[in-house]
Amino acid sequence: MAKDLLQLDVGEQLEPSDWMKIDQARINLFAEATGDHQWIHLDVERCQKESPFKTTIAHGYLSVTLMPEAFYGMVQLDSSTQTVLNYGVDKIRFLEPVRVEDEIRFISTLARKESKAMGTLFSFDTQVDIKGRDKPALVGTFLMMLLG
């Protein structure tokens, strides 16, 4: 169940996000948006022959950019009165490639909450799990600013 952002205590873990499927269409759209057209992401036939993964893999930053979609499912926000801005990511590390057709989910724990001039800054220690694998796709600290 989604938790009220303002009621979270430091050390509290949010419910994991829903699983998100990473298909080739999403990878292609990300390549177009970012200009990163490396063959390891886009060339299915070459990957089957030359890649150690034998399939295309998602861009590492594609997983990072899915945090807002996951986050809005993990916390309760009143969109008529609350606005959250992405504030950055600290110490991000990509540990395991996300292969095409993998499913990922975000698991976040509130590490810090601090008052700033613009509002409240929330720091979430987060890992992105890959369904069926032991090693996470990435770990990092995602920063979200609740305005006001």
Image: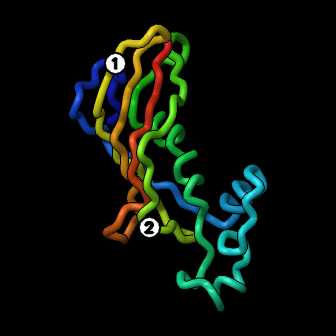
Closer to the camera in the image, 70 or 137: 137
Q: Earlier in the sequence, mark 2 or mark 1?
A: 2
- Give x and y (percent) for residue 93: 43, 55
Above or below for 49 versus 74? below
Q: CA distance from mark 2 to mark 1?
A: 31 Å
On residue 114, the disc is 1
Which residue is pictured at 36% across the width and 70% down the height? 133
The residue carrying pointer 2 sits among few (fewer than 14), some (14 to 19) or many (20 or more) residues within 10 Å by Cα, namely some
Please name the residue that numbered disc 2 is placed on.
Answer: 96
Q: Furthest residue to the bottom?
A: 49
Above or below for 147 versus 137? above
Q: Quadrant of residue 71?
A: top left
Identified by mark 2, the residue type is: Glu
Which residue is pictured at 48% across the width and 62% down the height? 103
Which residue is pictured at 54% across the width and 81% down the height? 53
For this view, does 61 lie left or right of residue 109? right
The residue carrying pointer 1 sits among few (fewer than 14), some (14 to 19) or many (20 or more) residues within 10 Å by Cα, namely few
Query: In terms of secondary structure, where does tag 2 sit?
Result: loop
- Give x and y (percent) for residue 107: 35, 47
